[in-house]
Amino acid sequence: MIRELAPSLHRWIEDADEQEHQDWTAWKPFPGPQTYATASLADEIFYGGAAGGGKTGLLVGLALTQHRRSTIFRRTFPELDEIVEQIQAIGGPTVRVAENKGRAVTDDGRKIKLGYMLHEKDKEKYRGRPNDFIGIDEAPTFSQSQVEFVTGWNRTTFRDQRLRIILTGNPPTTQEGLWIIDAFAPWLLEGYRDPAAPGELRWYSMVDGELKWFKTGEPFEHRDKYTGRQETIIPKSRTFFPAGLKDNPLFADGRYQATIQGKPEPLRSQMLYGDFSIGLMDDAWQVIPTAWIRAAQARWVANGGDDEPICAAGVDTAYGGSDRSVFVQRRGGWFSEPTIWKGAETDSGEKVADLIAPKMGSSRAPVNMDIIGYGAAAFEFSRKKGLNVIGINFGASGSGMTDKRQVLSFMNVRAYAYWQLRDALDPDVGGGMIALPPGRDVLVELASARYEVVGGKLKLEPKEDIAERLGRSPDVADAIVLANYMPGGVGFFFKVLETR
């Protein structure tokens, strides 16, 4: 019976394949944003905003038709299934996919590699792999450092082959994805001083370690203020194309729109309209709510602490490498903007002390410094300079420490110190006395800490886990937490304020 059915089944499969190939047509971008993005001369494009705008299809279509060697990334391995399906659907009979090897090859020799970076260190797997096209699908789910690293190999030896990087995605739903707004600030940052229109080209480059924007791509000479090296800066171009359901004819029946409209805010507006200006969704185990940080930043004014003496300072120290040394001053409830030094500037304890001393002047206010690891030498040199430096061991036991309401217990000093800042920012406890400096780093890093309860005690996740999500160490957050830290507890802080 099976033998009798086999020929019929074989013919049925052949007929289905033939019918599928007959239905297949070569890829062309949808009218509207997909077409505009395809024609754009920008070196780097951010495409999307709202859900359903044909983001993955654009990446696959361009890789199959306009580039010799491409890599398309998703954050996790299971997410690559969707890209494989799109390659098979869009490429049809012209493409062969080796799913087990994560690659596809077309009849005319184009190669597409699929990649994923679940962990921060996974980016190293793609070191030195040149691609004339790199697509980062759902870019806000990656860390900024992952994207910057893998796109560093956007190159080719073929003179007739253009280079292109396209990032796609919806508005970030967590603080860790906010980097995309700064990376495309002229289009996405609310209140940006010189906004750009969709599709308009702007040029950028990293100058003295900071992202700078230009109206043209004209090269210019510059001497790096850190290294003293003279170099010719050649800016690259970026642009943004908003796209959503209305731009994708495959979702014209309204069923996907109905699904999105059934979601709660802010997810509904983020997915339906690509709204980058509304709030994020806090993690259930987030130490400090995002809304409290934003409110404290809104209270901040430049020189707002001039009428107050220095109460304390916090220093998070890094020796060399990519981490930063950060200094923050506190005057009453007002925190200064963080002073940030690159690791190379603070590669010894003596250098750290030399940089801190002028910031403190003649003040005898405590300088709280984490003494684990690199901080020990900086602590010794700072003490020799006469600073009232206080060594804080974040890893020390939190035995006997409680929160403002005297309800919670803490695993160690680090958990206690972070919760002190939470209590100070809590509108029901602190009464809106704290003013935190502006800046995306302050918001993102303070909101990134998570906690758990172990054996009845509150424990913060390891600093390494936060760095894994952010793609960098939360040095700014630690400096602010140290500037706020008081062994006497947050209640002591409010008593000081009340007596002023």
Image (spheres, grey):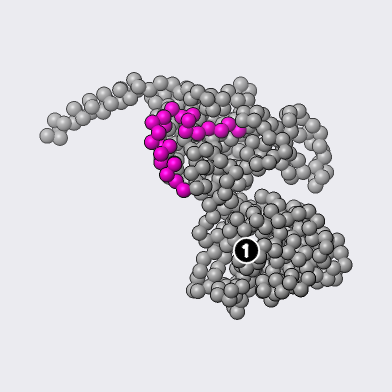
Q: Residue at x 61, y 38 (%)?
A: 151
Rendered-image quadrant of the C terminus: bottom right
Rendered-image quadrant of the N terminus: top left
In the rendered image, which residue does mark 1 sit on? Answer: 427
Q: Amino acid at mark 1?
A: Pro
Give the residues in magenta.
240-264
Label 1: state its secondary structure: loop
Q: Residue at x 41, y 39 (%)?
A: 258
Q: Which of the pair 82/199 is nearer the observer?
A: 199
Count residues near mark 1 (Cα–Cα under 10 Å), then give few for <14, some for 14-19, many for 20+: some
Q: Residue at x 40, y 21 (%)?
A: 25
Q: Is residue 243 magenta?
A: yes
Which image quadrant is residue 220 in?
top right
Q: Residue at x 56, y 41 (%)?
A: 275
Tell me if I can see residue 109 in this picture: no
Quick check: 336 left or right of 19? right
